[in-house]
Image (cartoon, grey):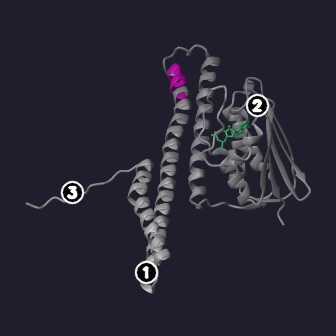
């Protein structure tokens, strides 16, 4: 009979590693440092000095390795936590539109609204809107994956930014009910911009989705695009919940979400603005934000004119 190879894995969490390093490395390190220093102080010949130097060097090397182990383990455990959070948040984000799609499809299939064409139409429009939301969410996750791996190809073309803006506006309008938001668009840009149409459309769409998501009942969103000096300026302004000044720089970090003090939860995965910033930078542009808590937020993108 073949002998069975058994592998034993030592599964340690971050605290386990820190305790192991403290007991198994730091104590011997401190001991050998002390012995090394004493040897150096009392040394009266070359052998004593060499022994002291060797002891102290050994201690320093061991301490350095222990530090590197702890740093690497911390980074690994942070990544694992972020990944787990992402999976949980994305699953949760998928569930909301999926539940709505199931509910409205069941309503139509049950025949309950068969003799009410207006109601049937409303049900199917809701299914359509939720499908668009799912599509945008999948786009967010895939764009993030490609951009974080540095493997996101852009198809650059030179032309006015108008078609990209119109594409984002059309997608956004398919996602929201007409009476749900007071949405206005001013598109006054003619200059040539070197850009990837679908990337710029996705960028604007992400800002519109956020403007809608982080606004209360009477939503008002303004999208303005016009030429300035040596480029084009795109701004998305809402009358929503706003942001405290302390959060403004952090919101572009991957997975960062502002904690709400009222305990309310607005769904999200914390990737929309990371993607916006990544895509804008890939176009040589800048993105900035002005906000007042309780009054609203304005995101502004500046893209350079094609040379
Ligand atoms: P998500 O919306 O999925 O949480 P984002 O990266 O798009 O991720 O946004 C990060 C955070 O920035 C959000 O959690 C939210 O708190 C804040 N934020 C983004 N857009 C707005 C906005 N228009 N108004 C207020 N807060 C916003």
Kindly tell me whether residue 202 is visible in this rendering. Answer: no
> Disc 3 designates what residue?
6
- Residue at coordinates 67% horizontally, 29% vertically from top-left? 261
**Depth check, front residue: 65 or 108:** 65
Residue, x 55% and y 26% (percent of image)? 100
Which residue position holds label 2? Answer: 240
Badge 1 is on which residue? Answer: 48
Say few, some or many: other residues with alpha carbon within 10 Å of mark 1 (under 14 / 14 to 19 / 20 or more): some
Q: Is residue 105 magenta?
A: yes
User: What secondary structure is found at the residue carrying circle 2?
Assistant: loop
Q: Quadrant of the N terminus?
A: bottom left
In the displayed structure image, the side of residue 89 where residue 27 appears, left or right: left
Labels 1, 3: front one: 1
Position in image of residue 307 (x %, y %): 84, 67
Q: Residue 180 magenta-drawn?
A: no
Q: Is residue 29 above or below residue 138?
A: below
Residue 98 visible, this angle:
yes
Alpha-carbon distance for marks 2 and 3? 59 Å
Query: Which residue is located at x 32 percent, y 53 percent?
Result: 10
Helix, strand or loop at label 1? It is helix
The numbered mark, 1 or 2, whose residue comes first in the sequence reads 1
Q: Is residue 156 left or right of residue 188?
A: left
Mark with earlier residue (2, 3) = 3
Residue 101 versus residue 300 in the image, above or below: above
Range drawn in magenta: 101-108
* Residue 11, percent from left and from top: 35, 51
Mark 2 near ligand 1 (CB under 8 Å)? Answer: yes
Q: Residues within 10 Å of mark 3 (few under 14, many from 20)?
A: few
């Amino acid at each position: 009979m073949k002998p069975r190879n058994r592998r034993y894995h030592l599964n340690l969490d971050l605290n386990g590693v820190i305790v192991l390093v403290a007991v198994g490395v730091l104590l011997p390190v401190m001991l050998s440092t002390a012995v090394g220093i004493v040897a150096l102080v009392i040394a009266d010949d070359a052998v004593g000095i060499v022994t002291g130097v060797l002891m102290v060097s050994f201690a320093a090397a061991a301490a350095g390795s222990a530090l590197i182990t702890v740093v690497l383990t911390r980074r690994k455990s942070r990544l694992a936590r972020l990944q787990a959070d992402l999976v949980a948040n994305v699953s949760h984000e998928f569930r909301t539109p999926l539940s709505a799609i199931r509910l409205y499809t069941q309503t139509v299939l049950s025949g309950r609204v068969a003799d009410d064409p207006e109601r049937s139409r409303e049900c199917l429009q809701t299914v359509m809107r939720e499908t668009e939301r799912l599509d945008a969410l999948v786009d967010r996750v895939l764009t993030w994956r490609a951009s974080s791996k540095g493997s996101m190809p852009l198809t650059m073309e030179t032309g006015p930014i108008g078609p990209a803006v119109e594409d984002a506006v059309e997608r956004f309008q398919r996602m929201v009910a007409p009476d749900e938001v007071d949405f206005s668009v001013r598109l006054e840009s003619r200059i040539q911009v070197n850009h990837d149409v679908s990337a710029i459309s996705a960028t604007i769409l992400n800002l519109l989705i956020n403007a809608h998501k982080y606004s209360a009942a009477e939503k008002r969103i303004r999208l303005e695009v016009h030429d300035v000096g040596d480029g084009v300026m795109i701004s998305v302004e809402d009358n929503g919940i706003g942001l405290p000044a302390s959060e403004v720089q952090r919101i572009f970090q991957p997975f960062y979400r502002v904690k709400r003090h009222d305990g309310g939860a607005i769904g999200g995965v914390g990737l929309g603005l990371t993607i916006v910033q990544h895509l804008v930078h890939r176009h040589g542009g800048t993105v900035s934000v002005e906000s007042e808590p309780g009054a609203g937020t304005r995101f502004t993108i500046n893209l350079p004119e094609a040379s």
